[in-house]
Amino acid sequence: MDEARARDVLAAAGVLPGPAAQAQLLALGENAVFAAGDLAVKVGRDAELLDRARRELDIAQWLAEAGVPAVRAAEAKALLVEGHPVTVWHRLPDPVRPAEPRDLAELLRVVHALPSPSFALPPRELLGGVERWLRLAGEAIDPADAAYLRERRDGFAAAAAALTPQLPPGPIHGDALPRNVHVGPDGPVLVDLETFSSDLREHDLVVMALSRDRYGLPAGAYDAFTGAYGWDVREWAGCSVLRGARETASCAWVAQHAPSNPRALAEFERRVASLRDGDETVRWYPF
């Protein structure tokens, strides 16, 4: 779905007060996100995302009722417009500063204290996309690398299923990174609620540990994160398992871009080589 197609769907939905052509495009990925006036609208890539869009609205309502600072829905139901799910949200004010790891930690503490909602949340399928991403990579990647990642996926999936958590399982954000926090005049709020799950709370914490070890997050910023949350997941015996699972998924995710992007292929090969070598000090770069 390109911007032109997304704007056509936005126009057909008729949910904005002004012309769709004048809406500001904020993001273009699995969803196109447009803003106009006090509203923001998400247009999903295809009809397969409709159930996820509906669940995201349920999650937003649940978080609102629980008083959790998060993005709020402006319409309670998702629309299906020309084969694309459309949801309408209250637009967030301009940020007052970039979100920091400690902001994320404070919000995770609130989320991790919540009981399960009345509706079902899915488990965090961290490795669920690996096969699709490798299939999309096709012949652009070495078949031996694809086989290696499949073997890692199977091994870590089994190991993760056998973990004994330190924290009580329950609702998690599922993609716990500072980029999914918006700091407005009233403080930090959670955004991108699509990955909310019910699983090991440690999933949300391993993300930042991996950011420190692989993606160059300064040690001081990580220490601020663990200080604000109140615990360092690296003290848990199962941390290496969830970290390994996430590294496997991250490699496969980059692989899908390899057929059309030489930079993606180079990053994929860097990541796989570091896993094969068992070298946890090799820097990975966001893609």
Image (cartoon, rainbow, N blue to C red):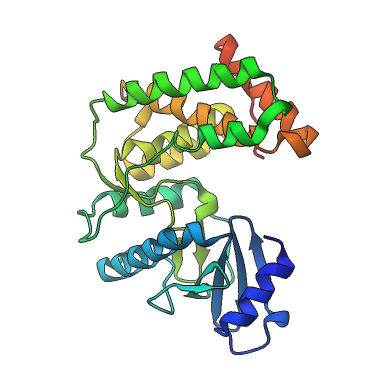
Q: Quadrant of the N terminus?
A: bottom right
Q: What is the tally of numbered marks visible in this picture?
A: 0
Q: 51 and 127: which one is in front?
A: 51
Does residue 204 appear left or right of residue 1 in this picture?
left
User: Does residue 226 sit above or below 9 in this rendering?
Assistant: above
Position of residue 251 measured from the top left corner of the image (x, y, whole percent): 59, 29
Instruction: Name, please, the residue furthest toward the front.
Output: 82
Residue 4 visible at all: yes
In the picture, residue 30 is in which quadrant? bottom right
In the picture, residue 14 is in which quadrant? bottom right
User: Does residue 28 sit above or below 38 in this rendering?
Assistant: above
Position of residue 64 measured from the top left corner of the image (x, y, whole percent): 32, 70
Which residue: 37% across, 37% down? 203
Residue 215 visible at all: no
Which residue: 72% across, 66% down? 3
Q: Quadrant of the C terminus?
A: top right
Instruction: Name, please, the residue furthest toward the right.
Output: 262
Q: 279 and 50: which one is in front?
A: 50
Position of residue 198 measured from the top left corner of the image (x, y, whole percent): 29, 46
User: Does residue 141 sit above or below 177 in this rendering?
Assistant: above
Q: 87 and 211: which one is in front?
A: 87
Which residue: 37% across, 52% down? 196
Position of residue 109 measured from the top left corner of the image (x, y, whole percent): 31, 49
Instruction: Name, please, the residue furthest toward the top.
Output: 277
